[in-house]
Amino acid sequence: MQRNRWQFHLVIRALAYRRGRTFLLIAVLSMAASLATALGIVSLTMEKRVAEEIRKYGANLIIMPEKARISIGSGGLNFGEFSEATYLNQVKTEDAIIRSGIQLEHSLHLSGTLRRGAADILVEGVNFEVIRRLFPWWHIQGSWPNGAEAVIGSRLAARLGIKVGEELELLGVAGVVRPRVAGIVNTGGEEDDLLYLALPELQQVSGRSGQLTLVRLLVTAGGERLKTAMDRLGPLLSGAVVKEVRQVARTSEGLLAKVKLLMMLATVVVLISAGSSVAGTMSASILERGKEIGLMKAMGGGRLNILLLFCGEALLLGVTGGITGYLIGNVIALFIMQTVFAAPPGFISWLVWASMGVSLFLALAGSAGPLVSVFRLDPVRSLRGE
Amino acid sequence: MLISIIMGASVATAFLGLAGELSFRIAMEMRNYGANILVEPMAAEQGGFLSDADLPKIKTVFWRYNITGFAPYLFGVIDISAGTKREKSVVTGTWFARLLTSEGEDESIQGVKVIAPWWGLSGTWPEAVNEAIIGAALAKRLGVVSGEEVTTTKERRTQIFRVVGIVTTGGYEEEQLFAPLATVQSLLGAPGRISRVLVSALTVPMDDFGRRDPAGMSKEEYEKWYCTAYVTSVAKNVEEVMSGSRAKPIWQIASAEGSLLTKLNRLMILLALLALTAAATAVSTSLMASMTERSPEIALMKAIGADSLQIIIVLLGEILVISSVGGLIGYLCGEQLAGFVSRSVFDASLQPSLWLLPTAVVSAMTVAMAGSIMPLRKALAIEPVQGLKG
């Protein structure tokens, strides 16, 4: 007991006596540990952030009736359609989405035609709130509609000569609607050719209450999540199919995987290089203490005793470095994530162990190596200063 | 000490070497999302067409090097039959992977294969004029598999296609038959005509200036807008060479790409900075550690009559030699490292950039010097008597 206390005392005094050196070692150890923490936090939370960014590309899954209409187009572009339409049941579909228990956002669509004067117009019923949130590429000239207002595609507006603020009279199978045009949408895609109404209104006027033609789903990309979602949703839907929008889904997965790999490689490279320098500094500080070790040996200290003393020092340094490193690393990660994604990274508590591990490993590896070579020294020689 | 300088210099080289390449690679990666510019006839509604004679000109515009690919499309509704089954469907004439030679420009491969890498194709791409690929949904309804033939009829013209592949996209393509453009043009009786062109271009993210309406700009502003690779200005470029056309950005792709690109670039810059700072700190601390070991040596030098300047010259000279050797080796290692990262992430080799060699050596020297200031000052303060006594 007495002996242990004495050893502890020795370690503390050794560190306190060489104050400058101790400070330097703690600084480099915490630098390495903070790098590990910061890079760890960034690469772990970045996947989520990038996945969120990728959501801006739009839906990656769609639900459509088993025998849907035939549309002509490429990728996100629709150039027109023909043949009879079939419909989804709104209640059943929404129910299936809820029952599948998958985290996703969805947008309901019903398309049809309404008569204006002598011409038919392609109309789509949507929920504008959802559109505004999930499809950020919609450029609206005018304002977003509220209530019974409508949005018109730019190409259609140009063709029919319709301006913002105009009131349209549209004739459906089951009634007439007179929406005011609140805005003109320009996306460069299929939206430009359509007139958008609120979903319930279109359902009512076209006599298709409770029916949909398409549901767009947005599942956060990454890993196997999409496939799981498809597998789980499929059996719950009757008379409908889930399809992967390959343009968005596949490309996003590829991109995410690459960004992740890149981050991992960068982390490894930085850690190895910083780590080797730190271990080098550690060992330099042991080597210069040859005389001290010689003295200990001369006084009858066994190898184990000396090893314990130095490991004790390394342990203390490592733990202190690890904790400060974790704190500094969090600040760095916070800074990076704030500047890049304007969102806090979120704290990952287990990284404190990773940080501690890195710091301890470097401290111990840096001191154990040189100790072995120091042990080979003859105490007489090292005391004489040779 | 040499090792830590090598490590530092190679990390610096690797990150700087990658940084330039990286934003380009990520931008290329994002082009996998497909075309971001749509070219359509000015009078699309009245059944207008574009001319396929204008297509090679797309590779001669001001922003030609930013255009990574394009594909023309011609659509038509036809009767399609296989065996006993008969359907009304859409045939699309396009280029799959066509060697394009424009005057004064390098040859390039253009077509669907380039701009739509997300297509899931089982089978091969069509090569002969009577080969076609068919959408998965249409194939299922007709009961067609790869290797079989389908007959297409428009008015009184008939064309038999051999199906060489089935395409899955989860989109509209699954309901169509894709065949070489020239064949479809003659089937539809529309020689030389195309209905759409999709262009995939590398662009810079839109900023406030880019969002302004070019019509309201002064001459200088318009020039600046035109000479910045905004998606709108590249679209304008393409529009100018395709007669009777209107080109517009596909905002779903263009806007998402812009914001993602900005963020990833910023992230990479910050990471490189972090790595460089770390490398610099590591190098200078290990220098500090190794300098203090040598206090007896410095004391001896002082004792035999060296003044401060001489000691500084000796020590700095040593550091300069070590750091230039370290910088050189570090540069070589760093190049390999950057090449490895680039290969394993992007499947692309990295051009060795020679300008990094002086950068690596000079930065190794600078860091080494900076790291030795403190220990040097300490060394100069050594009392010879004490230092020699030990």
Image (tube, coloured by chain):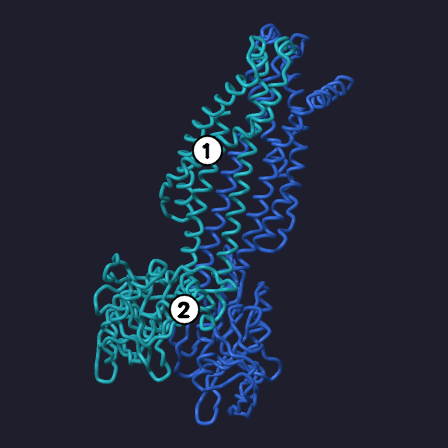
Chain colours: A blue, B cyan
Q: Position of residue B247 (x, y in %)?
A: 38, 72
Q: Position of residue A272 (x, y in %)?
A: 51, 34
Q: Is residue A38 left or right of residue A256?
A: right
Could you tell me which residue is drawn at 44 percent across and 49 percent down?
Answer: B22
| Discs 1 and 2 lie in a common subunit | no
Which SS class for mark 2?
A: loop
Q: Position of residue B57 (x, y in %)?
A: 28, 66
Query: Quadrant of the image for the C terminus of chain A?
Result: top right
Chain to which mark 2 belongs: A
Looking at the picture, tell me which residue is in the foreground, A318 or A338.
A338
Q: Is residue B137 visible?
A: no
Looking at the picture, tell me which residue is in the foreground, B147 or B40.
B40
Answer with the quarter of the image where residue A149 lies.
Answer: bottom right
Chain to which mark 1 belongs: B
Could you tell me which residue is drawn at 39 percent across and 83 percent down?
Answer: A83
Could you tell me which residue is drawn at 37 percent across and 39 percent down?
Answer: B354
Q: Which amino acid type corresponds to the residue marked 1 in the rendered image?
A: Val
Q: Is residue B128 left or right of residue A136?
A: left
Q: Which amino acid type corresponds to the residue marked 2 in the rendered image?
A: Gly
- Badge 2 is on which residue? A75
Q: Is residue B146 visible?
A: yes
Query: Quadrant of the image for the N terminus of chain A?
Result: top right
In the image, is residue B75 above or below residue B61?
Answer: below
- Badge 1 is on which residue? B362
Mark 1 residue crowding within 10 angstroms, few (<14) / some (14–19) / many (20+): some
Q: Position of residue B68 (x, y in %)?
A: 35, 59
Q: CA distance from mark 1 to mark 2?
A: 50 Å
* Number of numbered tags placed on the structure image: 2
